[in-house]
Image (cartoon, coloured by chain):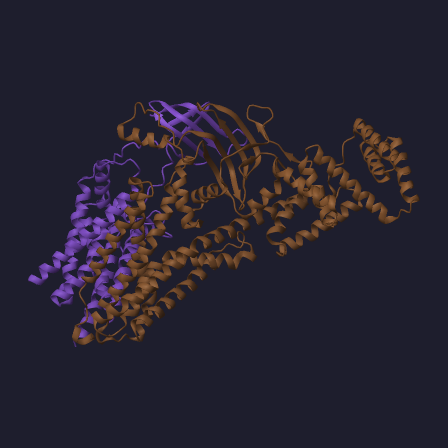
Amino acid sequence: MKPGKRILGATILVDGLAFLVFFALAAYERNANVIIPSYALKWELSKAFLDLAWWLPALQFLALALALGSMAGKSESLLRDSILPGVLVSALLAAAVLILAPDMETRRYSYLDLSGRFNKALADTRAALGDGRLVDARSSYGALASIDRLDSRAVELETRLVNAEIKAARGGGPRAAAAVAAPLRDPKAAREELAKAEDYFRQRDFYSANWHAKKALSLEPSLAEARVLADRAWGEILASGGSAADAEKAAFFGRKVEAFGYLQSGDAVSAYRLFSEMSREKPSDADVRRYLTESLAALETSGFFKDEADAAAAARVFPRFLILVPATPATPVAAAPQAGLPASRGSAAAAASTYLRPAAILAAREVAFTPESAFFFDLEYITLGSEGGEILHIVAPYAKLAAGKLFFESVERERPETVFMPSLASGGAAPLFVESRLDVLTLYRLAAGLRQPASSSTLDLFQGAVAAPRYGLSQKPFMAELLRRLGLPFAIFGAAALGTLVGIRFRPAGGKVAKAAWLALPVMAAGAAFFYYVGEAADRLLSDWVLRILPGPLSLAASAGLRAVVLAILVMIAASLRRHVPEAEGD
Amino acid sequence: MKNWFGAAGRFCADFLLVLILVVAIATLGASPAGTDAGGLLAAAIAAALRLFPIAAIAAIFLGYHAFERRTGRRFLSLLSVLVLGFGVLVGFTELRRLDLAPGLRYGKPLPPYGMVVENGTSSLLVGHYEGSSAVLALGYEADAQEAPRLFYSPRAEYSPETGTVRIGSHAFKSLEAAEPAWRFLPSIPGLEGRRLDERLAGLDGLQLPLALIVAGGMAFLAAGLAGFASLPRWPLVGFFFGLAGVVILVLLDAALMSPPALLLAGKLAAKLGLAKVAGPLVVACLEAFLGLVFTVLALVAGRREAE
């Protein structure tokens, strides 16, 4: 067999066996109380892949040593024939790992995170059901079902929840789905509604008259005039040939009027909610279509639905986010004199302060992203004056960044009476939104690079590292991950080179390997693993020290140079190993 | 004879090379930011006196091959690495007693500025420091129950002595929390905290003859395993056996010298009527016995090959 085929075969065999071992280990390691069954296999597969990627250099060393160490032939010709296939296989493996590993890391984290959320929602639902809090139970169940509705525990809980809701409805108790609070009594508003109803009645607009009269009645149930007017208007509708369909038409019209009223009063959130519902019922209605678009436009200029933030957080969330909002991107201001600092430190401080004239400070307990928006949880936002003094300190439970604006007001889609308003830390009303220069993609790169660098793409990491100082963030996590990734191709190529040379040097006499010798494979794998473990620790420390000396992107070049030198030294050492087999025997 | 000296030179070179490598890794890994050259040197000396057995074991394994190749005699090779390994182990054991390592004095690191410094769940960002002032200071306490969690001051009070920045009534640390000291040897499952350096620290109080016996036991075991590892007819297997042998030896030695094992050895000695024999001596004898078994196996296999 030619060295190329043998190298390929050994690589597939060794990596395949290793994957099976890692998969078995992942299955053993998986805690059924942590990872939910529907994600179990996916989590195990992603974990096994990531383990394989981490140990790949050791496996490549072993594969090439085995492939070439069990071949007969002249050393020189073996070496010559194995260089190209060895390089190609190593390049393919390195490329595959660099491309696939960030995605696998994202998946692995996501399965773990979603399972954690599922388990929490499960516990919350059970607790709420146990306490008879059906509204809370339904809310927690919603979170649970959005992750895995078919999980046996979710199915069982849904049955219990539905039964409890039916029982509560029979007993007159509040059903979770219909738990929207009744409007408060407001005699004054009722009178206004009644006046409108009378006005519409005079204009012979009986639908509007009926709807406004009913509205007045809902605001003041003791308003007998409203009840009479509603009945009269309904009688007129029936007298003109009205039917059950007319009743539906009237109700629909009434809702249109109500939604339009919301829109006119600036309550875009409620208007949008009603028009959306009507749009689902009658998508062809011209008024609904028109005002749905308008209400959406209005909503985007003043606030957002909280469930948008929840949906983004359900996918992935990054904790503890603190950044400076740059004043003027790409136009550094002159540095302030650095009195009392050593020269080198002063110049570094000057360089740092070149960017540190922020327009604002943003901090959030958590941040989540969609392609167009960033959502912040427990946000605090401080706007700064030109002299660095604090102007506003805004606190908001939820905030959204989209299209150059930071929105602080949010509302529950299903319970529009629940509005989350911003406030000032010093007390008082805060603006509902501010203009912001922040860019969603840049923030995503920063958050992902800081908290989960292994899941970021290489390009995102590099761009995040470049942007980080302007936002008052350390480049270290970005650069550390970039250096680790840069090290992977070196490690794989180095291991392949060493494996080739060790294999060729330590071939058996006569070039024949006894079958029993293959039984030593586990020990050989353990030896290779140990060898790599020490090498990887050394490489990590080298990267760490390179970062200490050169914290910026220059460290990539320095690290690449150092690794190239180490690789060359290792190859020279391996090449200098004396051959164990006399040329006459083995060749 | 010339070949023997050549192999002995190779043994010494291997020992120094591995020692430099492990000391460099251990020193660089455990040194915090701001460590100066003096601090690094002190840490390197301390690491060398902690980790020399690893270098000695590696040199025995690597040196055995050199001796066998150059002299062609298995018994002589085993004897040579045993003597040289024992010499190195004894020499460094004595060096430990001389208290050569100066006290570790790491320089006080300067607080970073211009970037967020995280310390547990609180974060601090300072534009730059001017004496006892932190210019553009903002602190964030992510886990605080209620807002405000974010605190800002254009110029806050900085205490270089305590390394804290005070923004209003809230104090923030200016340095990142020190990571747990990095250790060259990882924790061994079932032997938490029983690392080679701690094993050596336990032997420091022994009298010289006993320390020599302990070093001899280890050298014997290493030499025996090195000879045994070279038995496979496929040299590649021997190469990997050698790598695995170093790991096995380090783990085995740490396990045998752990307090429970020493206690057990002491009880065993007492049952055999040797109550006055110290636990380490029993373990050293056990290591030497195992080494002898491996050596005999290596020599027997060698004779069979010669036939």
Residue A132 visible, this orientation: no
The percent coordinates of residue A40 (x first, y second) are 52, 57
Counting every numbered tag in the picture gives 0
The foreground one among A587 and B179 is A587
The percent coordinates of residue B133 (x first, y second) are 37, 23
The percent coordinates of residue A400 (x first, y second) are 56, 38
Q: Which residue lies furthest to the right in this view?
A: A239
Q: In which quarter of the image is the N terminus of chain B?
A: bottom left
Residue B87 visible, this orientation: yes
Q: In this view, does A23 lie to the left or right of B63?
A: right
Q: In this view, does A524 lie to the left or right of A217?
A: left
The foreground one among B128 and B275 is B128
**Dividing the picture into quarters, in which one does residue B237 lie?**
bottom left
Q: Quadrant of the C terminus of chain B?
A: bottom left
- Which residue is found at the position 24% from the left and 44% from the top? B47
Image position of A494 with respect to A170: above or below = below
Q: Which residue lies furthest to the left in this view?
A: B1
The foreground one among A191 and A536 is A191
The percent coordinates of residue B150 (x first, y second) are 49, 30
> Which chain: brown?
A
> Which chain: purple?
B
Q: In this view, does B214 lie to the left or right of A287?
A: left
- Which residue is found at the position 23% from the left and 52% from the top? A565
Image position of A404 with respect to B305: above or below = above
